[in-house]
Amino acid sequence: MEDDDRDDEGHAQTEQELSCPYCGETVAISVDPTGGAEQEYVEDCPVCCQPWQVHVEVDADGRVHVWADAADE
């Protein structure tokens, strides 16, 4: 893993693309796969500012799966 793939604290990061459940724009977000096998958090769309519920799953092979739902659902 290259240094560019790590944050200031040395955690692995990966960039994933998501489609906003509100405006439909595709945006890239950074995900820390070392944050646990299952993660959930709220993040605002950088385009329309609506809140997403972001879901992150890291499988046994280290592959990261990310999706977002509307936070108000």
Image: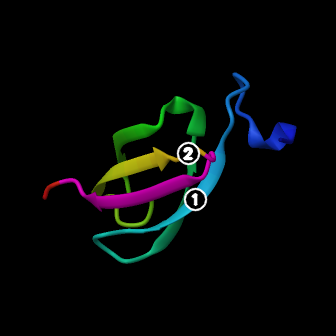
Which residue is drawn at the image coordinates 35% and 59% (left, top)?
68
Q: Are marks 1 and 2 in contact (CB under 8 Å)?
A: yes
Say whether residue 33 is left or right of residue 23: right
Residue 55 screen position, x and y as percent: 37, 50
Total marks drawn? 2
Which residue is drawn at the image coordinates 66% and 41% (left, top)?
13
Amino acid type at mark 2: Val
Q: Choose top left, top right, bottom left or bottom right for residue 67.
A: bottom left
- Name the quarter where the N terminus is drawn: top right
Q: Secondary structure at mark 2?
A: strand
Image: magenta residue range: 61-71
From the viewer's perspective, is residue 34 above or below residue 23? above
From the viewer's perspective, is residue 50 above or below residue 19? above
- Name the quarter where the C terminus is drawn: bottom left
Q: Which residue is mark 1?
A: 16
Q: Does residue 68 belong to the magenta stretch? A: yes
Give the Cα separation between the discs numbered 1 and 2: 7 Å
From the viewer's perspective, is residue 49 above or below residue 61? below
Q: Which residue is mark 2?
A: 31
Q: Secondary structure at mark 1?
A: strand
Residue 9 screen position, x and y as percent: 69, 22
